[in-house]
Amino acid sequence: MKITDIKSSGLTGATPLGGWAKDLGRDDVAHTIIAVHTDDGLVGIGSVFSSAALVEGALATLAPLYMGENALEPDRVSEKLHQHTFWFGRGGTVTHTISGINIALWDLLGQATGQPVGRLMGGRYRDRVQPYASILADEPAPMRDELERLRSLGFRAFKIGWGPLGRQSAHVDHTIVRTARETVGADVILAVDPGASDAHWSHGYKWALRTAQMLADYDVAWFEEALPPDDLLGYTELRRLAPVPIAGGEVLTRRQEFARYLQEGAFDIVQPDTTKGGGLSESRRIGWTAELFGARLIPHGWNTAVGLVADLHLASALSSTDLVEYKTGSPYIDDLTVPGFRLDADGMLEIPAGPGLGVRLDQDALGRWGTSDLGLHDD
């Protein structure tokens, strides 16, 4: 089975609010869907955490390397793309785009063999996984309302992030965390993410340590992105002294970057984003490496339904990955694929058992939010 074409379509018109760029609006493209076409008619789908224009440029650069390649060898083909584009820099748009290609190749391998991606990646440790509802932090009253709404929908794990956290005062941070814990109750997971990968983040190690001590009073499951992502020494010292688990890595790419942080003991939890960190192949390697250093992988998932379903399969194939991030309120997650996602009575998501990723793109949704034709046909 040979690759004959790769098409891409940015998602626009319903981009959820995010902290990474305050000027981004709902018409801006932060995520791009790709479709890998083959000579026997099968099509695999992937997701890339980059704008459509950047992805299109990367695909043009990569085309001589992937055209005619065997679509049933996701590890080898992806590594070929990585190795031959090293001179463009490890990370960034080229790596992000390879991530989406890798997801799509795993989807194709599953379709061709009749097996779910998780089984092909080594086995299914679990058939369902707990999603945590990921929301932006807010003033106490609206945040309380949103958390109550999500709890009523069945979520039993939550993360609050960005917003005012770390941007106003210690009192505001304390009030937000206290409100969140009182709202969701003592019996559920609550994580906190101030988003120190934000532009011109103003706090350092001492702020992070003081905040970690406050978070311990509210039994916070982990403290995420507490320091700027390049502060390896700070993360290492913070993990050594903080009374709560330290998490990070959403802006890192490939196993080489994660290996440095794990070797230095910087994280209790690593959070690669499968749609930009190298795809499922790299996330699996990062998960294996994390286990060697006493850490575990919980993927970053502020992306699309394709990214979420890829993370579900990743969670099925890694023994210690028992949570996935669910960006609530995003049409790109809730409405982009068929079938969609539904919590069971225990607040869990079923991991698809059908061939490949086990989902297909909703053509009506693509018509509303897509920027170009992916060349798909209805099943």
Image (cartoon, rainbow, N blue to C red):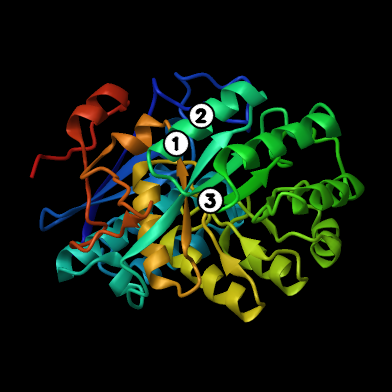
Mark 2 is on which residue type?
Glu
Tally the numbered discs: 3
Whether pointer 1 and pointer 3 mark residues with C-beta atoms closer than 8 Å, the reply is no
Mark 1 is on which residue type?
Leu
Left or right: 141 in relation to 109: right
Whether pointer 1 and pointer 2 mark residues with C-beta atoms closer than 8 Å, the reply is yes
Local SS, label 3? loop
Q: Which residue is mark 3?
A: 300
Query: Residue at coordinates 52% horizontally, 26% vertically from top-left?
Result: 145
- In this picture, is 277 found above or below 124? above
N-terminal label among 1 and 3? 1
Mark 3 is on which residue type?
His
Label 2 Cα neighbours within 10 Å, binned few <14 / some 14-19 / many ≥20:
some
Residue 183, horizontal then vertical, whole percent: 58, 37
Question: Can see residue 131?
Answer: yes
- In this picture, is 162 found above or below 90? above
Q: Which residue is mark 2?
A: 146
Residue 70, horizontal then vertical, whole percent: 26, 66
